[in-house]
């Protein structure tokens, strides 16, 4: 019958590779066939934007290396998709889903892409994403890009996918790859992970390098792993680690990276943990069905020995309003990124991207480009605007010092617990880590998860809690991928 890729974990794959039941080359072919059958046919999920033309050659080489000298580790021969804003110095493009950058090639791998290659991962291709990570315009559906079209949710194609790492989330959920890398500025790992019923880790800003990733906000950007299990997400996180002197955000994390995050995968990790629930932060936004799923998850945590502090409200939650930080930082960040692509890059500035879109409105402006225009013409790109400086300082005060820090200190908490990705509105501005885990499904089909969040570099605690909850609940189930016509 052959190896079954549906819901296969890294451990399953490695066992089959070690025994000789499977080769990485055969595994890549299986994923490619599944992509052909369901992503570009059938439901046409549109989660995969591009396939690495060298994927089979790389797999073959890694198979030979395994026979010669053994495995490099848990990522050896594992096919991974990268979000389309992560540079690869190969034959693949890096476009952030835009037609303006559809012919843009990076000269070298992003730092994390190189680390994954060094660990033996196969970069299978690029995942579709919300164009420019939702900085394109207002009112554009999450998961839409002019280059890749609309990503669809495999659990119910009429419901959202979440953004902007929509393709990464859907591809993992639909078993088009072993796992994927997404990026987050404000919910873009947690949101699609929630709606794809997968585990997603949004690390502390500065835990892993951002060099070579098409940026959105220098203050809030980070990449992170998206996988079907917490274990695989943790192994993928480990594979991306390493100090990058080119990323200034990493300076504060020196000595704070764990040498082995997998050592915190503790089935009894909930026992004795103090977990706070900021009920007033989201209470009125949940449906009765979603609230029921969340409360059931809380009961499971109690059964496993966690102390639940409910409520543990964040005092500044109602004071957190719209911030101009991302709008201002996008112009500065993307212009610097484009300049580094070299003289032969198809686009050299945000202004050139806007002009390209204006010349090709039928293909690129289905929903307009209001946000790009606002960024280009209403911000300086120098970050000198008084409103920006004030907003950045206010975000840190309300979200960190007087917000999450104050709440966790007052109640002596190990973590905060949020339904779905609701916590991302405050944790992202603080630059703090979160892990989301499946917690159930609504009757209409869309999954629903719970998110554990904590302070900077407290990933070990979050891994314990998320893994323990996952192991004692095991809510995730694969989507059927059957069309309504089947």
Image (tube, rainbow, N blue to C red):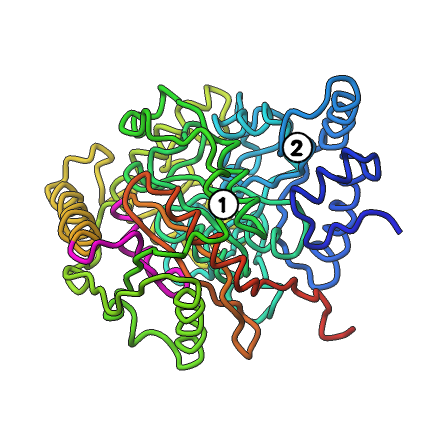
Residue extending furthest toward the right: 1
| As drawn, 112 above or below 325 | above
Badge 2 element: strand
Residue 413 counted in the magenta span: yes
Q: Which residue lies at the image location 31% right of the left edge and 65% below the top edge?
A: 308
Query: To which residue does mark 1 refer?
Result: 265
Q: Is residue 372 left or right of residue 5?
A: left
Count neighbours of disc 2 (C-alpha within 10 A) and say few if under 14, some if 14 to 19, many if 20 or more.
Answer: many
Q: Position of residue 181 (x, y in %)?
A: 53, 42
Considering depth in this image, is 338 or 329 the residue closer to the camera? Answer: 329
Of mark 2 and mark 1, the one earlier in the sequence is 2
Give the foreground label among 2 and 1.
1
Residue 46 counted in the magenta span: no
Q: Which residue lies at the image location 46% right of the left edge and 51% below the top edge?
A: 164
Q: Which residue lies at the image location 51% right of the left edge and 53% below the top edge?
A: 199
Considering depth in this image, is 476 or 320 the residue closer to the camera? Answer: 476
Badge 1 element: loop
Considering depth in this image, is 57 or 105 the residue closer to the camera? Answer: 57
Considering depth in this image, is 309 or 221 the residue closer to the camera? Answer: 309
Residue extending furthest toward the bottom: 288
Q: Which residue lies at the image location 36% right of the left edge and 75% below the top edge?
A: 286
Magenta stretch bounds: 410-430
Q: Is residue 362 left or right of residue 73?
A: left
* The C terminus, quarter of image: bottom right
Query: To which residue does mark 2 refer?
Result: 122
Name the image quarter holding residue 126.
top right
Count neighbours of disc 1 (C-alpha within 10 A) and say few if under 14, some if 14 to 19, many if 20 or more.
Answer: many
Name the image quarter holding residue 303.
bottom left
Q: Is residue 58 left or right of residue 141?
A: right
CA–CA distance in space, label 2 to label 1: 25 Å
């Amino acid at each position: 019958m052959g190896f079954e890729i549906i819901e296969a974990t890294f451990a399953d794959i490695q066992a089959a590779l070690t025994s000789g039941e499977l080769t990485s080359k055969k595994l890549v072919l299986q994923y490619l066939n599944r992509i052909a059958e369901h992503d570009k046919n059938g439901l046409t999920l549109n989660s995969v934007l591009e396939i690495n033309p060298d994927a089979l050659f790389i797999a073959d080489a890694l198979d030979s290396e395994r026979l010669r000298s053994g495995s490099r580790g848990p990522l050896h021969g594992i096919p991974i998709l990268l979000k389309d804003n992560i540079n690869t110095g190969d034959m693949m493009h890096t476009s952030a889903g835009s037609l303006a950058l559809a012919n843009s090639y990076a000269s070298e791998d992003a730092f994390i892409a190189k680390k994954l290659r060094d660990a033996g991962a196969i970069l299978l291709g690029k995942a579709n994403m919300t164009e420019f990570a939702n900085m394109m315009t207002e009112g554009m559906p999450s998961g839409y890009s002019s280059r890749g079209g609309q990503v669809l949710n495999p659990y119910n194609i009429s419901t959202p996918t979440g953004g902007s790492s929509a393709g990464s989330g859907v591809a993992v959920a639909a078993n088009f790859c072993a796992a994927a890398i997404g990026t987050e500025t404000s919910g873009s790992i947690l949101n699609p992970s929630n709606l794809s019923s997968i585990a997603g880790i949004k690390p502390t800003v500065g835990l892993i390098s951002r060099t070579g990733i098409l940026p959105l906000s220098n203050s809030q950007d980070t990449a992170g792993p998206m996988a079907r299990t917490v274990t695989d997400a943790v192994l993928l996180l480990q594979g991306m680690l390493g100090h990058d002197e080119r990323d200034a955000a990493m300076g504060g994390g020196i000595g704070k990276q764990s040498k082995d995050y997998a050592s915190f995968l503790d089935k009894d990790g909930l026992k004795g943990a103090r977990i706070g629930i900021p009920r007033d932060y989201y209470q009125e936004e949940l449906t009765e069905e979603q609230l029921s799923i969340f409360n059931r998850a809380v009961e499971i945590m109690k059964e496993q020995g966690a102390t639940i502090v409910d409520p543990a409200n964040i005092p500044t939650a109602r004071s957190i309003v719209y911030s101009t930080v991302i709008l201002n930082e996008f112009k500065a960040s993307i212009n610097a990124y484009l300049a580094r692509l070299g003289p032969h890059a198809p686009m050299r500035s945000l202004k050139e991207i806007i002009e390209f879109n204006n010349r090709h409105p039928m293909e690129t402006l289905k929903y307009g480009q209001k946000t790009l225009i606002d960024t280009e013409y209403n911000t300086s790109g120098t970050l000198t605007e008084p409103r920006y400086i004030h907003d950045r300082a206010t975000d840190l005060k309300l979200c960190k010092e007087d917000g999450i820090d104050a709440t966790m200190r007052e109640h002596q908490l190990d973590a905060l617990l949020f339904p779905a990705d609701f916590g991302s509105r405050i944790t992202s501005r603080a630059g703090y880590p979160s892990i989301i885990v499946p917690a159930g499904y609504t009757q209409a089909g869309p999954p629903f998860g719970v998110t554990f969040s904590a302070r900077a570099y407290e990933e070990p605690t979050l891994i314990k809690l998320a893994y323990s909850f996952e192991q004692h609940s095991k809510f995730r189930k694969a989507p059927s991928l059957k069309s309504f016509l089947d």
